[in-house]
Amino acid sequence: MSKLPLFPVTVVGSWARPPWLLDALRKRKAGQLSQQAFDDIADEAVLLAVKWQEDAGVDIVSDGEQRRDNYMSFVAEKLEGARLVSLAELMDMVEDKSGFEANLRQMDAPAFAIFNPTAVGKLERRGPIALDEYLFLREHTRKPIKVAMPGPYLMTRSMFVQGVTDKTYPNRDALAADVVRVLREEIRELIAAGCDFIQLDEPVFSEVLYKGDTKERTFMCGALSESSGDPDGEMRWAARLVNAVVTDLPKGPTIGLHVCRGNWSRQEEVLLRGAYDAMLPYLLIMQVDQYVLEFATPRAGELGVFSPYARARELGLGVLNPRSDMVETPGFIRDRVHEALEFFEPSQIYLNPDCGFGTFAERPLNPPKVAYAKLRAMAQAAETLRAEVGARARGTLVS
């Protein structure tokens, strides 16, 4: 990656899609718009998203995931052997139909936005999963670029549906082998093309550790997935899958792992909560460069959980709540970074929102104006922090 300033400012990935892009997305899904016509419209949305980011002072930009209907289900269009299964179809497959429906209502899950990518045959890439998105953005910004992709645990757990997937794959391990293969193929091509930052999204880790030992098919951030009911076994298996994807990759980009506690609702009380101390021993097994974690709300606990693991990895420090109207002040962000500096070097800390601003295309969590104001506050805090570190280095900082 090109040289970055201290405390690089970045995003987690998604950005609200403009209404005209949503209309085009609906028409493409209905077969009323060609892929080329949709891409021409989406190109304009990407340029708008990156303009917002650059004007705010973001150092590592994304394309806002403008071409994706959400952060996960878009892979069904990119893979042979996968298709989107509607909520109505999935309701016929779950064990406890009434309980599952009640769970969705309680968690304020947007049923109209839920389509689960399901393995219905052998997985193969039809073409690029995200490389095409990166190449377009590369032509239109001089900034380093982050590309987010669903992680191997999330993909495997979501895509394996008993009674459907097991006609091709006898178990989750068999499916996981092909998930790992297609992700490695894609990441190698992104690295060869010069991608600066590749982020694997694994929000379901939070559900494994904070929701309990449920074995039922449950909802987590748009992923309708089934657990073994053994949190320790699930997390160790997840670590093996992540390492199978990232081990022995060519040198070049930063490889990040993003974990949140859900980003589908503005109702904080329906989202998962729990400190990272239960998760960190498993994260440390995973051979990634950076943990991209949420710390803007009390639901995530305190930074002191890093005390036993100080400086072990870089930290993408979540300092903005993407679900709130309130714009965090540069002072709030600066104070949060000062807490992190007890356990990380300045060069190890990146600044980002807790999660994306538009996880679901049809249900963005904040409009661009609010998202811009939040990112601008983060950039202003980074400028102050850089000046502080520089002053300390010169011995001129007065407390």
Image (spheres, rainbow, N blue to C red):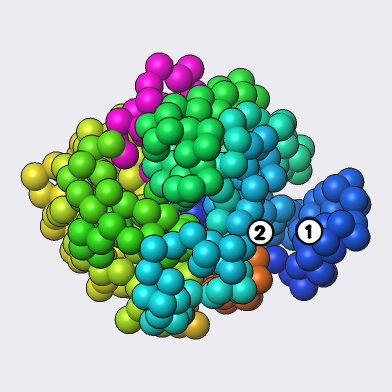
Label 1 to label 2, Cα distance in Å? Answer: 10 Å
Dot 2 amino acid type: Asp
User: Compared to 156, does 335 lie above or below?
Assistant: below
Q: In the rendered image, which residue does mark 1 sit on?
A: 29
Nearer to the camera, 283 or 306: 283
| CA neighbours of label 1 inside 10 A, class few (<14), some (14 to 19), many (20+) | few
Dot 1 amino acid type: Lys
Q: What is the x, y in percent for residue 6?
A: 39, 45
Q: Which mark is residue 250?
A: none
The residue tagged with tag 1: helix, strand or loop? helix
Residue at figure coordinates x 51%, y 42% from the top left: 165
- Say left or right for 385 vs 112: left
CB atoms of marks 1 and 2 within 8 Å = yes
| CA neighbours of label 2 inside 10 A, class few (<14), some (14 to 19), many (20+) | many
Residue at figure coordinates x 32%, y 52% from the top left: 227
Q: Quadrant of residue 19?
A: bottom right
| Of pointers 1 and 2, the one earlier in the residue sequence | 1
Q: What is the x, y in percent for residue 73?
A: 59, 53
Q: Which span is picked out in magenta? A: 238-257
Q: In the rendered image, which residue does mark 2 sit on?
A: 69
